[in-house]
Amino acid sequence: MDFTEIFLALFIAVVLITSLISNLLVLVCFIYSSDIRKQVPGIFIVNLSICNILITVISMPSTLLGIIKHRQVFHDCICQTVGFLETFLTSNTMLSMAALSIDKWIAVVFPLSYTSKMKYKDAVIMICYSWVHSLTFPLVSLFLSWVNYNKTYASCTLFLKEEAERRKYTVFTAVFHAATFMLSLVVLSFTYMKVLKVARFHCKRIDIITMQTLVLLVDIHPSVKQRCLQEQKRRRQRATKKISIFIGSFIICFAPYVITRLIELLPFVRVNYHWGIISKCLTYSKAAFDPFVYSLLRQQYKKVLVNIVNRMLKRDLYPSSGHNSSLDTENDYCLQRNS
């Protein structure tokens, strides 16, 4: 193994550990908190976390072993199963992100009619569609024997062995990425741009009210006025930053791999081995990035995690105390009041 391969192997190992822990924490929060379970976005986040966990425990170790061994480490049947699941799970994660953006769009743009437009059963229907959509292309590729070990990416994935089928494989690959990556990107861009537009409108209204108040308060200290102006600037930047993270992380993590898979369809193009693995590693990094983007950094999830830690500490300090249970009940009540 050269230095690049060692670095990529370590990178996958770090991503694997981070992804597994963070996504499991999301599932723990969902199971522990009834408020999170009642919210419609919760079902999208759980579906996304489950897909990320499966990618972490199935696909990442396979690629890691492929980098270390420089060869296929599993039997053909197992390799095809891993490739099938990876294609399905990756597609499902993209569509889950698109579903989350649609939910956010309805919540922000149509806040008064959100409960009627986005019900729990509507979320279940969207998840079912993403599963059916994500299963279609892997099943076709598995039926046509287009799932094999690909040395360029050191993993079991879509790979054409018979040159006679190149035309069909090219059409299939182009349609597959258009129906998953491009569809999800278009939905993400449209919905979050609408959300950003509404956020900027509300920020502008708040800024106008703030400036009118500052004009009326003639005796206000200059430092207070300066802090108000700085808060206005931070408020405007906050919405743009969040939207940039949602869309930017999707593009950075998935676009290099998708573009590489499309470029390699050209008969005169040969993808560099190291670049192939790098683009693959970027897709894996999204599994570790998603829990922080969509859930763990939100105040609600932080409170749930803090409450879980507090309960664990109380059990250690008071393992057989009856007073402990009353404290837990009071803590749960306070958590519900705050959330």
Image (spheres, helix red, strand yellow):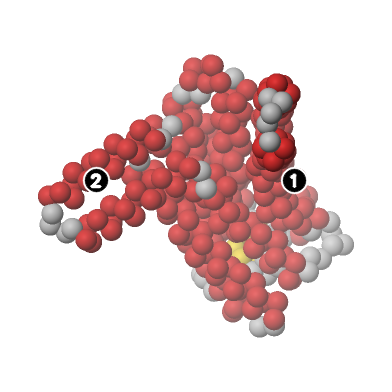
Q: Mark 2 highlights which residue?
A: 328
Residue farthest toward the bottom in the current orientation of the protein: 1
- Identified by mark 1, the residue type is Ala
Q: Is residue 188 visible?
A: no
Q: Is residue 328 visible?
A: yes
Taking depth in this image into account, of 243 and 268 the one nearest to the observer is 243
Q: Mark 1 highlights which residue?
A: 174
Q: Position of residue 119 (x, y in %)?
A: 46, 23
- Look at 60% across and 59% down and name the residue there: 284
In the picture, which quadrant includes the C terminus?
Answer: top left
Q: Position of residue 67 (x, y in %)?
A: 62, 74
In the picture, which quadrant includes the N terminus?
Answer: bottom right
- Look at 38% across and 50% down and name the residue there: 306
**SS under mark 2:** helix
Q: Are marks 1 and 2 in contact (CB under 8 Å)?
A: no
**SS under mark 1:** helix
